[in-house]
Image: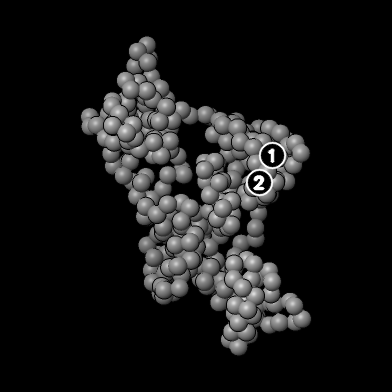
């Protein structure tokens, strides 16, 4: 009971009332201090999880909702939408099987695949893998992992494990996490000799007057933001140059596909480029 109250950030009295309601509904059973889901409760829970994760995927891929807000917004939505509306949305998106954090979406029949991968905190030096899941709760930890630029699909190479801290290379940058933070990340090990992902320069690193060729957009850039950039010509192979600063210094005016567009630093940090100079233009 205490752990439920703590996880939900509610009082013990509120937790007791909640459990009492679930008992009356036949969704849980209680044996001493152990609370367990009934078959009906498990089925209902999986339906709620399916709705939640489908809407998280929609928020990530189809809207401009900030990454750190996907979970809380889906928490709100899941209580107001019908199962039918959610299934229509899933069909429109091609029935995704994972949410944007890498969590599996239960099938409509309530089936979940067996979990795979290892926690980053348990990996040894010299291991190469690919992030397949980042836990989005608690929010305070997830937000810091987002700030570090980590996301599912990113390749990592563990360079050191010392005093519990894990140091690894991701996208050419070194990152060190404590066991608490590293345990929020699940990694799929890559077998054999795997070349390290190259370190790309960022569009935000261009000084006024510098030119570059766009190498791509980070997978961490999703939804409307990604589509807007691509519609403006920010695609692999396009030439781009930094033309002018705004009065505040952000956004910067970049010349792409014959037009000058304003791109904020937060977006420019998600665009990979190869810088060019007069000798290789």
Tell me where residue 210 sits by quadrant.
top left
State if disc 2 and disc 1 touch (CB < 8 Å).
yes
Alpha carbon distance from label 1 to label 2: 7 Å
Taking the image as shown, residue 95 lies to the left or right of residue 239, namely: right
The quadrant of the rendering that contains the N terminus is: bottom right
Residue positioned 68% across, 43% down in the render: 178
Residue positioned 70% across, 77% down in the render: 35
Residue positioned 45% across, 73% down in the render: 79
The quadrant of the rendering that contains the C terminus is: top left
- Nearest the viewer among 19 and 123 is 19
Identify whether 178 is placed above or below 195: below
SS state under label 2: helix
Q: Position of residue 27 (x, y in %)?
A: 61, 82
Identify whether 73 is placed above or below 142: below
Q: How many marks?
A: 2
Identify whether 146 is placed above or below 71: above
Tell me where residue 157 sits by quadrant.
top right
- For disc 2, the neighbor class at 10 Å (few under 14, some 14 to 19, many from 20) is many
Disc number for residue 182 = 2
Q: Position of residue 274 (x, y in %)?
A: 42, 25
For marks 1 and 2 on the same chain, the one whose residue lies earlier in the sequence: 1
Disc number for residue 119 = none
Residue positioned 59% across, 71% down in the render: 10
Disc number for residue 166 = 1
Taking the image as shown, residue 151 lies to the left or right of residue 181, namely: left
């Amino acid at each position: 009971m205490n752990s439920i109250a703590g996880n939900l950030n509610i009082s013990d009295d509120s937790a007791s009332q909640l459990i009492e309601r679930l008992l009356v509904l036949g969704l849980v059973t209680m044996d001493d201090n152990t609370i367990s889901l009934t078959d009906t409760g498990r089925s209902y829970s999986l339906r709620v999880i399916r709705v939640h994760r489908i809407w998280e995927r929609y928020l990530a891929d189809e809207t401009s909702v900030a990454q750190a807000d996907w979970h809380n917004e889906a928490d709100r939505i899941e209580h107001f939408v019908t199962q039918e509306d959610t299934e229509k949305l899933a069909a429109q998106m091609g029935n995704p099987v994972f949410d944007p954090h890498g969590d599996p979406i239960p099938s409509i029949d309530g089936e979940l695949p067996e979990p795979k991968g290892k926690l980053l905190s348990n990996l040894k030096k010299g291991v190469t893998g690919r992030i397949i899941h980042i836990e989005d709760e608690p929010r305070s930890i997830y937000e810091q992992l987002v700030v570090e630029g980590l996301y599912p699909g990113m390749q990592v190479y563990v360079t050191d494990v010392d005093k519990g801290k894990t140091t690894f290379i991701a996208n050419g940058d070194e990152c060190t996490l404590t066991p608490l933070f590293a345990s929020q990340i699940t990694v799929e090990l890559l077998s054999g000799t795997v070349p390290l992902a190259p370190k790309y320069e960022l569009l935000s690193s261009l000084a006024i007057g510098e030119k570059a060729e766009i190498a791509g957009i980070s997978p961490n850039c999703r939804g409307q933001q990604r589509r807007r950039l691509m519609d403006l010509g920010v695609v692999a192979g396009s030439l781009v140059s930094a033309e002018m600063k705004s009065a505040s210094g952000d956004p910067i005016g970049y010349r792409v596909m014959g037009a000058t567009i304003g791109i904020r630093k937060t977006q420019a940090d998600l665009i990979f480029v190869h810088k060019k100079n007069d000798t290789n233009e």
